[in-house]
Image (cartoon, rainbow, N blue to C red):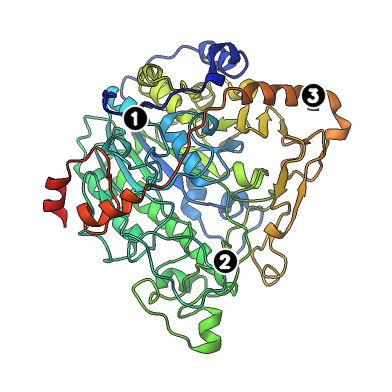
Amino acid sequence: LKPTGSRMRETFTASTSAMLFPSIFALAALAVSAAPSQEKPTKLPHIFFVVVDDLGWADVGFHRTEKVPEVSTPVMDNLVKDGIELTRHYVHMFCTPSRASLQSGRLPVHVLTGWSEPRDPKGAIPEGMTGIAAVLKRGGYATHQVGKWDAGMATPAHTPKGRGYDSSLNYFSHGIWMYSGSEWLGSEDHVQEVPPPGLHDLWDTDKPATAFVGEEYIEYTFRRRMLDILHAHDQSKPLFLQYDSRLAHYPLQAPEEYQERFAHVKQDNRRMYSAMVNFLDDQLANITDTMKHLGMWDNTLMILTSDNGGFVRDPLGPCVGQGSAQFLATGRQQQGVDGTHGTVCFNGEAGANNYPLRGGKYSNFEGGIRVNAFVSGGFLPEKVRGSKLEGMIHIADWYRTLAEGIAGVDPTDKWAADSGLPPIDSLNMWPMLSGANLTSPREEVGILVTKDLLVKGRWKYVRGGSKMIEAASGGPHYPNASTATDPIDAHQFNCPEQGCLYDVVADPTEIHEVSADNPDVVAMMKAELLLQAKTIWEAVHQKDPACEAAAYAMYGGFYGPWKEVETAPVAQLFV
């Protein structure tokens, strides 16, 4: 896609003049040029990229030193055993910026650091940025996306198809109800009944996915689509399959057979969350086993990451439905398709565990931005399998890694340059992942997470006066009986005047704030943060009421693009 004269171009602000880039962009360019030269593989691998929603650090077996019955992820554990565990894989502290970062190859500070709703007329990613799928298509890849998009839909160009995916079965919002396929409108506070859903939110490439809504648990629908893609794929071409799982985002819902597997877990939020993660594990078993059956796995590179840490907020009231503590105490029945499949949790935002990391989703602590991640698959060189990598990686780095390191395609975004938008920040991690070296180019460049937070090498610096929310760790078993009276999000403090400093290599749990002991490091990190912060790119994100009107007028109550769309044919076809 190319910009047309009728489309508004979002432009780089004046603060992003080239004269202000000597730190982050010059270092990034040096890191790219210093990487060992590589030839394009003779046979390009299939790429299976999994983004899990809100997966807590302690919610997988490979991050547990002792087995606990509430965590059951044997498939992911074995994939890590046969692959590479990425111990310092960074993302944003909540979902939309992380997803925009992956798809665009930019750090969130150069694409999006706040919220962007489906109703946003600019979308989470400016139209003039080239998506990773479009780049991989230049390398000959077939490209398909399944699951949560959460990266814009204002025009057809903002949808997965517009970003380069041959097909998609996706939803556009932050979360949907698992059975009705309707938008989740946010957490409640001590509500006793399943709240009404929002608009239908399921899209099939270029039209509403009317055939799939209300049929079954939505992750079964996603599974069938992925299996169909695998069976129909022409294996003479490489495949890029992007699976953006609904698991384990709020509201918490799971098939009743999975709820029963964790009946021994008495805290409702924890039981439901554990059931959802266990479903995810089975989901991955189905897909990877099918790839093996079809002879694809030996030439597959699988990447898995969470989009942020697990949520550790106050439950703010009960879960409801059959099997919940509320039901056992009162016998209160729920109504509607989302209230009649056992327990459902929609109050507060609790259930995950990031132990021993401090904090969680929404926070500056490692529990919010350092996430479960690994690489696996038969394409990995034998010598790196079963290893751990300590080098820093950001989710944005997969853009160049897959384009340049795997597909042999130049990822330079000429469209963005022509549109006055920031260049990609992505760095090629394949030399480190393949064992050519053990050094991450991200160590020297660092990660500007927000205008107030920089991670560089072993150090994390947070600007003085910043509020540090979720300033606690929940222990091996969290949430638990005491969570309702002492949740992690009840703890917070402000950084001292000079800022907070943590050595996240020696002290990944961030118990020790060491700014007073390291004034030279504080000065260096503060200067670097201020310099890199001058490159921040921002856009104003709002909600356009025309979006909801178009959902009813054009798509029969489904979310879909509402700008630059031929309305009459769409309305005739789908209403």
- Classify mark 2: helix, strand or loop: helix
Is tag 3's residue or tag 1's residue first in the polypeptide sequence?
1
Q: Nearer the viewer, residue 266 or 110?
A: 110
The reply, left or right, for residue 541 in relation to residue 233 is right
Is tag 3's residue or tag 2's residue first in the polypeptide sequence?
2
Q: Which quadrant is home to the N terminus?
A: top left
Quadrant hosting residue 466: top right
- Classify mark 3: helix, strand or loop: helix
Residue under label 2, please give it.
Answer: 270
Q: Which quadrant is home to the C terminus?
A: bottom left
Residue at the image point whose x is 19% and y is 43% from the top: 232
Residue at the image point whose x is 68% and y is 24% from the top: 530
- Which kind of residue does numbered mark 2 sit on? Arg
- Residue 441 placement (x, y as % from top left): 58, 21
- Residue 334 placement (x, y as % from top left): 42, 80
- Which kind of residue does numbered mark 3 sit on? Ala
Is tag 2's residue or tag 1's residue first in the polypeptide sequence?
1
- Residue 200 placement (x, y as % from top left): 30, 59
Residue under label 3, please give it.
Answer: 523
Query: Extreme right residue here?
Result: 517
How crowded is the residue under tag 3: few (<14 C-alpha within 10 Å), some, or many (20+)? Answer: some
Could one spot residue 501 in this view of the protein?
no
Residue at the image point whose x is 49% and y is 58% from the top: 277
Residue under label 1, please give it.
Answer: 45
